[in-house]
Image (tube, rainbow, N blue to C red):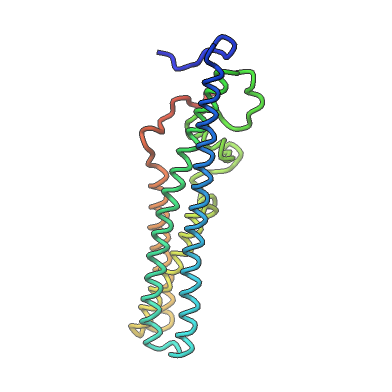
Amino acid sequence: MSTEMPPAGRDPAAAAKLQILATEHWSLLATRSLTYTESLGRVNMFLAILSGAVIALALVAQADRFGSTFITVAILMLSVVLFSGIATVARLMSLNRDDYRWVVGMNRLRHAYLELHPELEPNFITSPFDDLSGALRTLGIDPAGGQKLGSVFHGLQTLPGMLSVIVSVVAGFIAALAARGFALPSYGVGVSGAAGFAVAMVLMGNWGRRSVRTFSPSLEARFPTPKP
């Protein structure tokens, strides 16, 4: 059975269909707005925790002169910051997947608009196709123009990518403080911090790539972009 709608001029229920599609479209727009709001709220919460921890550690350092008490307190506080950062990155990845879902839904609705009124196609700059290429076009990402979705530079520009770097720095500091607590020399502390940062970055990067590659079966393309 074909899923295409007859043109609006020959469809007596075209007005009702347009109203239903428009209502769903506005609903998805509102949901995307809530997704952005929660993403920014999560980021602000993490940065507030990080800032508070840095200020508290500065006060402890003044009192203990970077002694054993400072190292113990710093490791405990930065562990809390590390946990909150990992939880924030996980939630941001989930929100990004949700936002992709809403974009796919809006593209499907746009496809339905064009089935009712195909003459409106020149007026749309976003895509009516619900595959990955169509979703990227709606999001303003053009792989053909040099923008690579999976590139390192693009990943670092996203909120999860940016926070992954900060979280990895926190992990590196924890490793360096632990090395300092074991009385390693300065170069050993530096190597431990760099190793902690590198390991955390690799783990966070692999986690991010896996989260992008897993999509729900409901997001399988029903209206793929025509091949040239």
Q: Is residue 55 above or below residue 227?
A: below
Q: Is residue 192 visible?
A: no
Query: Which residue lies at the image location 52% right of the left edge and 12% below the top edge?
Result: 6
Q: Is residue 168 visible?
A: yes
Q: Nearer the viewer, residue 215 or 30?
A: 30
Q: Quadrant of residue 221?
A: top left
Q: Is residue 7 above or below residue 39?
A: above
Q: Nearer the viewer, residue 124 or 25?
A: 25
Query: Which residue lies at the image location 47% right of the left edge and 70% below the top edge?
Result: 50
Name the quarter where the N terminus is drawn: top left
Q: In the image, residue 24 lies at what x, y percent? A: 50, 31
Q: In the image, residue 148 lies at what x, y percent? A: 54, 43
Q: Is residue 115 above or below residue 40?
A: above
Q: Nearer the viewer, residue 8 or 204?
A: 8
Q: In the image, residue 80 lies at what x, y percent? A: 38, 70
Q: Nearer the viewer, residue 66 or 91?
A: 91
Query: Which residue lies at the image location 39% right of the left edge and 68% below the top edge?
Result: 196
As drawn, the residue found furthest toward the left would be: 182
Q: How many marks?
A: 0
Name the quarter where the C terminus is drawn: top right
Q: In the image, residue 118 lies at what x, y percent? A: 60, 18
As drawn, the residue found furthest toward the top would be: 10
Query: Which residue lies at the image location 41% right of the left edge and 33% below the top edge?
Result: 219
